[in-house]
Amino acid sequence: MVWHKVVLNLLISTVTVSAIGFYGLADDEPLQKVETEVGIVAKKAKTGLSEKKSKSASKSSSFPRFSRPDSFWRKKLTQGQYYVARKKGTETAFSGVYWNHHDDGVYTCVCCGSPLFDSEAKFESGTGWPSYWQVVDKSLIKLHPDTSSGVIRTEVNCRICSAHMGHVFDDGPRPTGLRFCINSASINFVPRKKMPEYLEKWREEIGFPALEKGVNGAISN
């Protein structure tokens, strides 16, 4: 099974959702531009799913929430992971495990395990943080305006567990023009050959019905 098929299947499952309406932040122009471009990329993805199936998947309102008390995260995560993922911290540039990581596979949320970034979308940004030009599936992330540093940025969170990933900027490479600047402390890495088994376990633990059909179909191919 080739993982890019999984990526495209997941992307197309939410293709009919308006990028701006999906996040509910249309009054923020920088964020609107980013969301629109994410939606355009999804619409250009080619899969075997019909339009009818895509619309059906996109209308699913059943999003699981991997909500746990703070004590759970303090025990599960390292001090650095907790600071970044749960307290919206930022690791020092060029200090993370994955900024110069080039193995083939998928980067998952350090907290709930959701598959968020594919190594095929990773690129050298020169920033010292792992950078990607697209996400595995835009339904798995949540974008928020962030003014904590004194400038307007777009924060990227895991939609399932609300873990802080980093920020997204509009200075990335083609075809999206996006740069998802992600903290190594917020992600783990799963080799591509282990993804079928990993996705099965993740689906069972998180219980994500919106992606169940797409994930199962990709694993069985």
Image (cartoon, grey):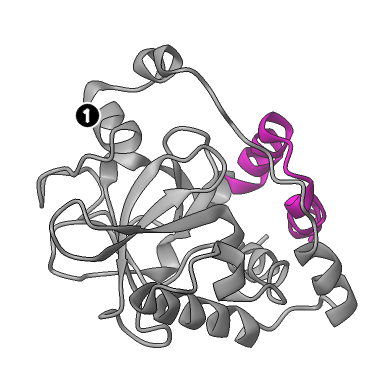
Residue 160 horizontal/vertical position (percent) = 57, 42
Q: Residue at x 80, y 63 (%)?
A: 59
* Whether residue 174 is situated above or below residue 98 in the rendered picture: below
Residue 166 horizontal/vertical position (percent) = 30, 53
Label the magenta part by its dominant secondary structure.
helix
Q: Residue at x 44, y 77 (%)?
A: 32
At label 1, the amino acid type is Gly
Q: Residue furthest right?
A: 52
Towards the viewer: 25 or 44? 25
Q: Report the residue marked by disc 1.
A: 80
Q: Residues within 10 Å of mark 1 (few under 14, many from 20)?
A: some
Query: Dot 1 lies on which element?
Result: helix
Is residue 137 visible in the rendered structure shown here? Answer: no
Q: Residue at x 41, y 70 (%)?
A: 121
Q: Residue furthest front?
A: 27
Is residue 147 visible in the rendered structure shown here? Answer: yes
Over which residues does the magenta segment extend? 195-221
* Whether residue 60 is situated above or below residue 5 in the rendered picture: above
Identify the image quadrant of the N terminus: bottom right
Residue 214 horizontal/vertical position (percent) = 77, 59
Towards the viewer: 47 or 76? 76
Q: Residue at x 61, y 39 (%)?
A: 198
Q: Residue 145 lies in what quarter of the image?
A: bottom left
Left or right: 55 as drawn, with respect to 193 = right
Towards the viewer: 37 or 215? 37
The magenta stretch spans residue 70 = no
* Whether residue 13 is situated above or below residue 34 in the rendered picture: above
Left or right: 168 as drawn, with respect to 197 = left
The magenta stretch spans residue 203 = yes
Residue 221 horizontal/vertical position (percent) = 79, 61
